[in-house]
Image (cartoon, grey):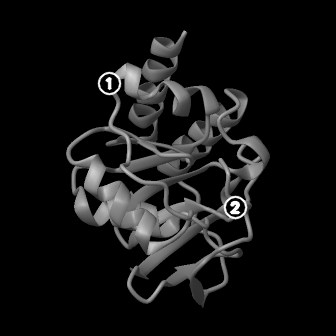
Amino acid sequence: MGEVYIGTKFTTRFARRRAPDPDARLAELVRACRRMALAGLAPGGAGNASLRSNDGFVVTRTAADLAAVGPEDLVLVLACDVGRAELLVSGLHEPSSESMLHAGIYRARPDVGAVLHGHADTLLARAAGLGLPVTEREQPYGTAALVTEALAALGAHPFLVIREHGFVALGETPEQAWLRIEDVLARLR
């Protein structure tokens, strides 16, 4: 991870200033966040997670501490215009700086219900040897260029390594996405 975090690189418009209503699916997303933090995959707030919803998708807020994330740290993304770098949200905070990446994945992959994004230097270094798809080029985080690069490499894969950055694990549920991370971590050992 060579790039220094400077915050979101898109404009956020708030439709409402309130946290999403808690439910069992959001509790599963919170559990996945905490597992990522405990596994060391979200150093210094560098990870994020999302869940597809009827109205768009729910994502962790920008720079969230995944070890302590709660319902108030979740933001409902109602619309995302990647080309204009603009999001319409309902929440108490700015959404994750990687929200456009999540939006691009949900748009391209109707089979995906959850996205977990984390960081692991060992995984970046050994991805090719594990046969994992890797983006061709490094792109700045939180940008349309990163979305384009990630989608070009992702295809139908459930796991993608983003060159010099991190990874995304996909699933129908946060639990399924987490199990994909566990599988990759076991292969690293």
Between label 2 and label 1, give the one nearer the viewer.
Answer: 1
Image location (x, y in percent) of residue 166: 55, 44
* Res 144 quadrant in image: bottom left
Image location (x, y in percent) of residue 29: 54, 46
- SS label for mark 1: loop
Residue at the spot of label 2: 73
Left or right position of 131 against 51 = left
* Res 19 quadrant in image: bottom right
122, 42: nearer the viewer = 122
* Res 27 quadrant in image: top right
For disc 1, the neighbor class at 10 Å (few under 14, some 14 to 19, many from 20) is: few
> Where 183 sits versus 77, above or below?
above
Image location (x, y in percent) of residue 22: 58, 58
Q: Quadrant of the C terminus?
A: top right
Residue, x 48% and y 84% (percent of image)? Answer: 85
Q: Residue flagged by tag 1: what amino acid is it?
A: Gly
- SS label for mark 2: helix
Residue, x 43% and y 61% (percent of image)? Answer: 102
What is the number of the mark on residue 131? 1
Q: Residue flagged by tag 2: what amino acid is it?
A: Asp
Query: Does label 2 or label 1 sit earlier along the sequence?
Result: 2
> Where 92 sits versus 169, above or below?
below
Residue, x 71% and y 46% (percent of image)? Answer: 66
Image location (x, y in percent) of residue 72: 71, 63
Q: Residue pushed farthest front? A: 137
